[in-house]
Image (cartoon, grey):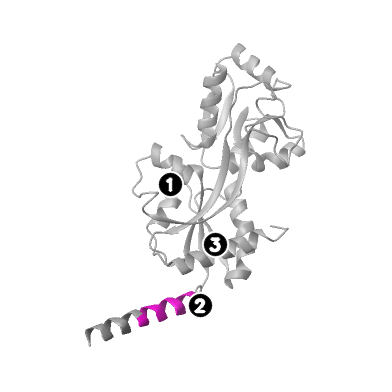
Amino acid sequence: MRKLTVALVIAALAGIATAHAQTYPTRPVTLIVPYPAGGPSDTLARVLAEGMRGPLGQPVIIENVSGAGGSLGTGRVARSAPDGYTLSLGHVQTHVINGATQNLNYDLVKDFEPVTLIADTPQWIVAKAAFPAGNLKEMIAWMKANPGKATAGTVGVGGPTDIAGIMFQKSTGTAFQFVPYRGGAPLIQDLIAGQIDLTFGQAANYLGPVRAGKLKPYAVLASKRWWAAPDVPTIQEAGGPELVSTFWHGMWVAKGTPKDIVAKLNAAVSQALEVPAV
């Protein structure tokens, strides 16, 4: 009798899981972007959300929860119900670097379930159009002749742009000031306006202004040239140090989210990325 009862319970749970997989989602899904609207992460999220709508059969709503280098929005997902209705869009800073540089009230490994890798873009050295250097060697020479005079924008403190800038300083013997921003959108606005001199940002985020002549690219921090801007040399080709830094994005849900829901979200992202427009 006892064995029969256990078997019935297992069968019932299996039936619930199957039904759950078939019905999810029954309402809109929220994708938390831990940075302000208009930046690279936000843009990526909005394009992806539109592509996921069809496969999921429900809208994916973007919610910007910025602050503390992306840790505020990321923490909200860590504390959310593990039901697949609150997603985290993040990257190398939010889901790796912040764990080493901040005293987080959540665990980046134990409190999240990875859904998928989304995109990867190299970082590059890009400056305001009026910066007084024609190439990377001239930039390094100018910085050495004017120590501490140049200003470099970063997203938060201790993030990928900050770390790349510090590594560049150490490897070239240069010195410049860091100016932290809440997100990529206000940073790029000030860079175009000439309020700051340069940044070590995501190449995809600055491609439009570079093509329009509003910003000046000096080198891509990669072992080979970036396919979207093949005329921009790698940092070594430009006469700089061996410095490689990429900026990847991914998606997570709260730990404990059923595997069938994770699989459905993974499939929705994959289908969205297969669309040429996306």
Query: What is the secondary structure assignment of the residue under circle 1?
Result: helix
Along the viewing direction, whichever of 229 and 139 lies nearer the viewer: 229
Q: CA distance from mark 3 to mark 1?
A: 23 Å
Q: CA distance from mark 2 to mark 1?
A: 33 Å
Q: Is residue 55 visible?
A: yes
The residue carrying pointer 2 sits among few (fewer than 14), some (14 to 19) or many (20 or more) residues within 10 Å by Cα, namely few
The residue indicated by pointer 1 is 71
In which quarter of the view is residue 268 placed? bottom right
Query: Is residue 83 part of the magenta span, yes or no?
Result: no
Q: Along the horizontal axis of the image, is 192 left or right of 264?
A: right
The residue carrying pointer 1 sits among few (fewer than 14), some (14 to 19) or many (20 or more) residues within 10 Å by Cα, namely many
Number of labels in the image equals 3
Along the viewing direction, whichever of 36 and 105 lies nearer the viewer: 105
The amino acid sitting under disc 1 is Ser
Q: Along the horizontal axis of the image, is 43 left or right of 115?
A: right
Q: Position of residue 242 (x, y in %)?
A: 60, 25
The residue carrying pointer 3 sits among few (fewer than 14), some (14 to 19) or many (20 or more) residues within 10 Å by Cα, namely many
Q: Position of residue 264 (x, y in %)?
A: 53, 67
Q: Along the horizontal axis of the image, is 2 left or right of 139?
A: left
The residue indicated by pointer 3 is 266
The stretch in magenta equals 11-23
In which quarter of the view is residue 133 placed? top right
Residue contact between numbered discs 2 and 3, judged by CB atoms under 8 Å: no
Along the viewing direction, whichever of 261 and 83 lies nearer the viewer: 261
Query: What is the secondary structure assignment of the residue under circle 3?
Result: helix
- In terms of secondary structure, what is the magenta stretch mainly? helix
The residue indicated by pointer 2 is 22
Q: Position of residue 79 (x, y in %)?
A: 37, 58
Check the image and name the residue furthest to the top: 145
The amino acid sitting under disc 3 is Asn
Q: Which mark is residue 120?
A: none
